[in-house]
Image (tube, rainbow, N blue to C red):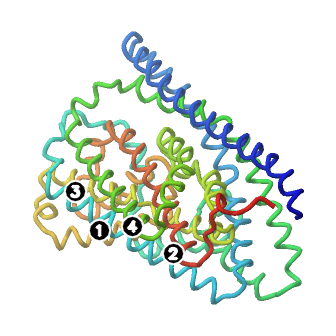
């Protein structure tokens, strides 16, 4: 492009960039306002309404959150399939797929072990389970979780990973199964060569259209945030922190330490661009925090990481894998919650045996794969693990009253972990550009 035309075009590009930034900032402020309004409305209802009326309000308010999350889940399966297949095809060959996948798994396993070990160390150091008030158990709420629990076996694990039908995997949003099918399909397209270009182009166009749908879905985010926050405050109130202040404080300490470790590792690899990455993912972080679902921001996170400078072929390959293998906040909480329950019930065979705790850590490493940030899925895994180690599974009822607030922070941490993983692998692959440094064309 001639210099004169570049000079003429530059203001247009600036206007477009500023317009997009304004829309993103506006949505962020709407979400923050919705959180504050949700807390106020929920607290007023908790104060002045009868318990029955508060429960009725919460039931209807949760519909707003359910609608938003279901809208996002609607686009998850087609987005994972289309972007992952295109990403593998663009990588070019099986060797490149193996190289990128290997680097991603190296980060995932390292981050997972750090997260699980951190939860284990904190619980042994501070003994938060001893402060849990046994009279505050939410026995009614745990019944729903018990119906979802299934004992861990190798057979169940294989069934959870290997799809018998891609249609079923899409219908149930089984991210890990979709990843497996998409890898096979993407590698098959790559082996066909140039004849597969039409299919790849079609899937790339489909991914672009789905990302456009994401923008429409995100407009409903403030309503979903308001519903989720106001519902839990209306039924629980703010006084819940009086009973669980120490448990919650130690959990937040663990989250803060985990963030420090992740951000330090990211800074060592990404350098000063860490600041730009955190700015980019600010909006997804808010949504994950307020809806307690890291899955709800998967499409938006895909878009923001590409804007940050990660190449689409790396994002579309690493990010779906991350949602199955790299839920750092959830994994830290699993060891934290499991051992805290053991402490509350005085299960000395677990609390006084480090080897047993390390075995529990490895079991959690396996059983946590594929939960994809679904709200309360961490507690389902904790239930199954507790049963294996003779910890009363109904002990999950002890932490249920505070779990929503814990889930807000662990969901946000999951987003940070996956954003970092994708950015780091992009840097290792030489596929991380700086859009701000590139001249407008």
Question: Which element carries disc 1, helix, strand or loop?
Answer: helix
> For the residue carrying disc 3, how many other residues have a C-alpha within 10 Å: few (<14), some (14-19), or many (20+)?
many
Q: Which residue is mark 1?
A: 361
Frontmost of labels 1 and 4 is 4
Q: Is there a contact, CB below 8 Å, between mark 2 and mark 4? A: no
Q: Earlier in the sequence, mark 1 or mark 3?
A: 3
Coordinates of residue 267 in the picture (x, y in percent): 42, 64
Q: Is there a contact, CB below 8 Å, between mark 3 and mark 4? A: no
| Marker disc for residue 339 | 3
Between the C-alphas of marks 1 and 3, the distance is 10 Å
Between 69 and 92, the one lying in front of the other is 92
| Marker disc for residue 203 | none
| Marker disc for residue 104 | 2
Q: Earlier in the sequence, mark 1 or mark 2?
A: 2
Frontmost of labels 2 and 4 is 4
Residue at 45% from the left image edge and 15% from the top image edge: 53
Q: Is there a contact, CB below 8 Å, between mark 2 and mark 3? A: no
Coordinates of residue 345 in the picture (x, y in percent): 15, 49
Rendered position, 244 above or below 373: above
Between the C-alphas of marks 1 and 4, the distance is 22 Å
Locate the N terminus by quadrant: bottom right
Q: Which residue is mark 4?
A: 265
Residue at 27% from the left image edge and 62% from the top image edge: 118
Question: Which element carries disc 4, helix, strand or loop?
Answer: helix
Question: Which element carries disc 3, helix, strand or loop?
Answer: helix
Rendered position, 224 above or below 87: above
Q: Earlier in the sequence, mark 1 or mark 4?
A: 4
Q: Is there a contact, CB below 8 Å, between mark 1 and mark 3? A: no
């Amino acid at each position: 492009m001639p210099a004169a035309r570049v000079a003429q075009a530059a203001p247009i590009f600036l206007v477009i960039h500023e317009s997009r930034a304004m829309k993103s900032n506006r949505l962020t402020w709407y979400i923050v306002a919705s959180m504050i309004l949700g807390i106020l409305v929920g607290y007023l209802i908790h104060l002045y309404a009868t318990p029955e009326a508060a429960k009725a309000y919460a039931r209807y308010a949760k519909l707003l959150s359910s609608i938003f999350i279901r809208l996002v889940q609607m686009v998850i399966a087609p987005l994972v399939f289309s972007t992952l297949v295109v990403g593998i095809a663009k990588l070019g060959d099986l060797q490149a797929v193996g190289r990128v996948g290997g680097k991603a798994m190296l980060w995932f396993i390292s981050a997972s072990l750090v997260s699980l070990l951190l939860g284990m160390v904190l619980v042994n150091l501070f003994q938060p389970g001893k402060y849990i008030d046994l009279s505050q158990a939410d026995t009614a709420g745990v019944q729903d979780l018990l119906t979802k629990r299934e004992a861990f076996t190798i057979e169940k694990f294989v069934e959870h990973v290997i799809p018998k039908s891609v249609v079923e995997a899409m219908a149930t949003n089984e991210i890990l199964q979709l990843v497996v099918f998409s890898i096979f399909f993407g590698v098959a397209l790559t082996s066909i060569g140039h004849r597969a270009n039409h299919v790849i182009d079609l899937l790339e166009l489909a991914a672009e259209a789905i990302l456009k749908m994401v923008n429409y879905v995100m407009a409903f985010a403030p309503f979903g945030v308001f519903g989720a926050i106001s519902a839990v405050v209306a039924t629980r109130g703010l006084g819940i922190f009086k009973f669980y202040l120490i448990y919650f404080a130690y959990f937040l300490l663990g989250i803060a330490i985990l963030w420090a470790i992740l951000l330090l590792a990211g800074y060592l690899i990404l350098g000063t661009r860490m600041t730009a990455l955190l700015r980019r993912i600010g909006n997804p972080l808010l949504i994950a925090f307020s809806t307690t679902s890291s899955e709800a921001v998967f499409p938006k996170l895909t878009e923001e990481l590409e804007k940050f400078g990660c190449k689409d072929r790396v994002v579309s390959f690493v990010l779906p894998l991350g949602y199955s293998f790299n839920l750092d906040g959830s994994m830290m909480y699993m060891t934290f919650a499991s051992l805290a329950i053991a402490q509350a019930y005085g299960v000395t065979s677990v609390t006084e045996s480090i080897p047993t705790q390390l075995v529990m850590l490895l079991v959690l490493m396996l059983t946590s794969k594929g939960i994809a940030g679904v709200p309360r899925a961490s507690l389902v895994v904790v239930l199954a693990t507790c049963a294996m180690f003779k910890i009363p599974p109904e002990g999950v009822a002890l932490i249920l009253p505070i779990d929503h607030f814990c889930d807000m922070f662990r969901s946000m941490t999951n987003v940070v972990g996956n954003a970092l993983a994708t950015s780091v692998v992009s840097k290792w692959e030489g596929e991380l550009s700086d859009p701000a440094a590139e001249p407008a064309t």
